[in-house]
Image: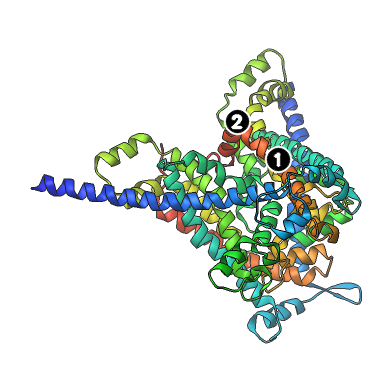
C-alpha cells in the first residue's frame, strides 16, 4: 500500500514537472520569437523602398531592393563622417582597445600571480576593491582630466585602457596560477631572463585565453556607444552613428536605409559570435568561480 | 672581527626588478591617475562651488541637495531621479536576477530547444544596445505601424507611443530592461549550473528529491559563489547603471536617473560641482550597503569545494 502511495506521489510529481516545463517552454519560445521578429523585421525592412515602408510597415517586401545597402554609404553621415569613416573608427577603437586592455591585463595578471614583491598584495586587493566599491560620479572629473591631458577626441583615449585591472585581470591571474613555474626555472637554467620567460614561454601559453577574451572585448568595444559619444565625438563609431542617425532629418524619412545600416553594423559581431560561440559564452561566464 | 658582507643581487634578481618595473609602471600610473586622482578630485568637487569664476570650498551644494530631496523645493527633479534609479535597481535585483536564475535552471535541465535558446538569449549581449533600443522604439511607434500599438488597437485600446507619454514612458523603459536583461545572467547562471557535479544530481534523483528541493537545496547552494557575486555587483551598481535612457528617451517624460543626469551634465559641460555632491552622497550610501550585502551573502551559504 505504501509502495502504491509512493508511486502515485512520484507520478503526480512527474506530471506537475512536465506541466511546469511545458509552461516555461512556451514562455521561452515566445520570448525568443520577440528577438527573431525584431531582427527579422529590421532585415526585411532594409530591402524595401521608403514609401512602401511608410504605407505598410509590417508587410512582406513587394520588391527586394538592395540599393539601400549601397546608398547607406553615400547618404548616412554624421558630422562629416560617412559609413566608411565610422567603420574605420569602429575598427581602430575595437582592435586597439582590445589589444591594449588584454595585453595589460595579461601582464599584470602574470606579474601579480608569479612574483613576490612589495606591494603585490596591495595591487591584488586594489583590483578587487575597484570592482566592488561603487564609486558614483567620477565621470565629470574623468572628463575634465582627459580634456586637460588632451586625450578627449583623440585616439590617445585608448591609453585609459592600460589599467590592467578588472575582471580580465582576475581571469589571467587564475590562468597563471595553474601554469607551472618549472617552465621559468628551465629557462633560467638555460641562461634566459625574466623577459624571455614571459615573452617566449608564458605569453604563448596564454594565447588561447587572450584570443577568447579578446573576442569578448572586441564585441564590447564594437558596441560601445556611451564612451565614444562622450570622449570621441569627432570619431563616431558605427554604434555611435546608429544612435545619432535617428536625429538626422533626412534619415528619419528613410527608415529602410537606416535599417540597412543597422544590419551592416550587426553583421560583424553576429559572424564573430557564430564562429566563436563557445569561446564567447565560456569567457562571458563569471570566470574562475566554481559553481 | 666581524665582517659585514654586502649581499650582491644576482643578475636574475636585478632582471626581475627591471621586468616588474617595465611591465607594472604603466598600470600603476593608470590607477594613480585615472582612479585615485579622479576619485579624490570628485570627492573635493563635492565640497566646491564656482563663484564669479573662482572655485571655493563650500557646503552650499549639500544644503541645496538637502532642500532638493527633503521636498522643500516643490519643483525639484532630484526625488524623481532617485525614484527612477530605485525602480531600475529593484527591477534588476528582484525581477531580472531571480527570473534569470529560474529560467537558466530550465536551460540546465535541457528543456526542449535549449541550444537554440542559449543562442538567441545571448544576442542582446552581442548586438549593440543602440540597435536593440532603436528597434524597440520602432515597434512602439504607432506612426510607423509599430506592432505594439497595432495590437493594442485591435483589442480596442488607444494606439499611443508609450515612450513619449509621461504616464507610461518609465514603464516602457522598464519593460525594455526586462526584455533585454535576462540574456547575460541566464548564460552566466547556466554556466555555473553546468559545473555542478553530475554525481550530486544523480544521487538527488535517486533519493527522489522534488523540483523545488533540487533548486533550493542543491542548485542554489552549489552555485552560490556565482549567484552571490551577481547579487553583490548588482547592489554595487545601484546608482551607476542608468538603463538605456540615452537611447530611448534622453531623460524626457520623467525617465531620467542619477547616472544619466551625471552623464548629461558631463556631456553638456555644465557645472560639475553639484553633480559631484549628489554622486558623493550616493557613494556614501552605497559603499556600506555593498559591504553589508557582501557580509549577508557570505552568511547564507558556505562555499562548497568540488
Figure quadrant of residue A187: top right
Helix, strand or loop under label 1: helix
Of residues A205 and A219, the one nearer the viewer is A219
Q: Position of residue A112 (x, y in %)?
A: 64, 36
Contact, mark 2 vs mark 1 (Cβ under 8 Å)? no
Residue for point 91% across, 77% down? B52
Image position of B68 with respect to A270: above or below: below
Distance, label 2 to label 1, CA atoms, is 34 Å
Residue for point 31% across, 37% down? B202
Residue under pointer 1: A267
Q: Position of residue A285 (x, y in %)?
A: 55, 42
Of residues B266 and B147, the one nearer the viewer is B147
Of residues A69 and A212, the one nearer the viewer is A69
Q: How is the image coloured?
A: rainbow
**Image quarter hosting the C terminus of chain A:** top left
Left or right, A81 with reference to A263? right
Residue under pointer 2: A176
Helix, strand or loop under label 2: helix
2 or 1: tag closer to the N-terminus: 2
Left or right, B41 with reference to B52? left
Figure quadrant of residue A183: top right
Amino acid at each position: 500500500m505504501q509502495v502504491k502511495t509512493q508511486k502515485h506521489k512520484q507520478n503526480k510529481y512527474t506530471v506537475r514537472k512536465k506541466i511546469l516545463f511545458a509552461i516555461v517552454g512556451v514562455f521561452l519560445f515566445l520570448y525568443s520569437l520577440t528577438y527573431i521578429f525584431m531582427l527579422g523585421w529590421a532585415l526585411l525592412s532594409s530591402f524595401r523602398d521608403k514609401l512602401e515602408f511608410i504605407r505598410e510597415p509590417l508587410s512582406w517586401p513587394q520588391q527586394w531592393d538592395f540599393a539601400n545597402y549601397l546608398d547607406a554609404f553615400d547618404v548616412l553621415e554624421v558630422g562629416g563622417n560617412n559609413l566608411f569613416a565610422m567603420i574605420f573608427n569602429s575598427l581602430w577603437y575595437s582592435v586597439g582597445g582590445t589589444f591594449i586592455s588584454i595585453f595589460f591585463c595579461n601582464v599584470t595578471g602574470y606579474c601579480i600571480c608569479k612574483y613576490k614583491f612589495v606591494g603585490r598584495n596591495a595591487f591584488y586587493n586594489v583590483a578587487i576593491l575597484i570592482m566592488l566599491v561603487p564609486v558614483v560620479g567620477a565621470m565629470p572629473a574623468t572628463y575634465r582630466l582627459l580634456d586637460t591631458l588632451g586625450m578627449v577626441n583623440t585616439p590617445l583615449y585608448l591609453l585609459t585602457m592600460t589599467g590592467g585591472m578588472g575582471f580580465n585581470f582576475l581571469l589571467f591571474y587564475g590562468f597563471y596560477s595553474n601554469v607551472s613555474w618549472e617552465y621559468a626555472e628551465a629557462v633560467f637554467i638555460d641562461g634566459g631572463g625574466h623577459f624571455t620567460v614571459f615573452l617566449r614561454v608564458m605569453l604563448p601559453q596564454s594565447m588561447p585565453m587572450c584570443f577568447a577574451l579578446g573576442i569578448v572585448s572586441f564585441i564590447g568595444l564594437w558596441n560601445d556607444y556611451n564612451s565614444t559619444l562622450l570622449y570621441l565625438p569627432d570619431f563616431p563609431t558605427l554604434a555611435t552613428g546608429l544612435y545619432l542617425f535617428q536625429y538626422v532629418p533626412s534619415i528619419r524619412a528613410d527608415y529602410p536605409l537606416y535599417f540597412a545600416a543597422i544590419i551592416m553594423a550587426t553583421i560583424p559581431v553576429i559572424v564573430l559570435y557564430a564562429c566563436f560561440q563557445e569561446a564567447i559564452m565560456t569567457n562571458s561566464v563569471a570566470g574562475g568561480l566554481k559553481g | 672581527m666581524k665582517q659585514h658582507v654586502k649581499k650582491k643581487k644576482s643578475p636574475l634578481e636585478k632582471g626581475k626588478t627591471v621586468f616588474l618595473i617595465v611591465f607594472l609602471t604603466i598600470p600603476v600610473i593608470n590607477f594613480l591617475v585615472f582612479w585615485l586622482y579622479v576619485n579624490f578630485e570628485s570627492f573635493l568637487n563635492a565640497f566646491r562651488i564656482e563663484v564669479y569664476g573662482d572655485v571655493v570650498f563650500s557646503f552650499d551644494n549639500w544644503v541645496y541637495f538637502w532642500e532638493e530631496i527633503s521636498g522643500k523645493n516643490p519643483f525639484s527633479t532630484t526625488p524623481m531621479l532617485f525614484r527612477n534609479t530605485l525602480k531600475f535597481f529593484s527591477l534588476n535585483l528582484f525581477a531580472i536576477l531571480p527570473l534569470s536564475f529560474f529560467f537558466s535552471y530550465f536551460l540546465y535541465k535541457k528543456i526542449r530547444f535549449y541550444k537554440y535558446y542559449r543562442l538567441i538569449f545571448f544576442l542582446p549581449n552581442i548586438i549593440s544596445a543602440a540597435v536593440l533600443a532603436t528597434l524597440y522604439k520602432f515597434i512602439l511607434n504607432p506612426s510607423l505601424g509599430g506592432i505594439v500599438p497595432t495590437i493594442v488597437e485591435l483589442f480596442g485600446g488607444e494606439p499611443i507611443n508609450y515612450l513619449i507619454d509621461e504616464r507610461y514612458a518609465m514603464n516602457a523603459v522598464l519593460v525594455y530592461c526586462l526584455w533585454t536583461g535576462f540574456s547575460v545572467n541566464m548564460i552566466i547562471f547556466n554556466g555555473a549550473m553546468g559545473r555542478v557535479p553530475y554525481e550530486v544530481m544523480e544521487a538527488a534523483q535517486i533519493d527522489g528529491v522534488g523540483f523545488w528541493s533540487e533548486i533550493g537545496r542543491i542548485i542554489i547552494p552549489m552555485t552560490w559563489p556565482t549567484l552571490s557575486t551577481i547579487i553583490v555587483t548588482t547592489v554595487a551598481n545601484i546608482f551607476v547603471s542608468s538603463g538605456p535612457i540615452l537611447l530611448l528617451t534622453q531623460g524626457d517624460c520623467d525617465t531620467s536617473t542619477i547616472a544619466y543626469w551625471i552623464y548629461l551634465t558631463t556631456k553638456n559641460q555644465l557645472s560639475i560641482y553639484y553633480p559631484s555632491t549628489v554622486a558623493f552622497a550616493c557613494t556614501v550610501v552605497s559603499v556600506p550597503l555593498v559591504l553589508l550585502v557582501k557580509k549577508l551573502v557570505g552568511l547564507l551559504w558556505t562555499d562548497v569545494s568540488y
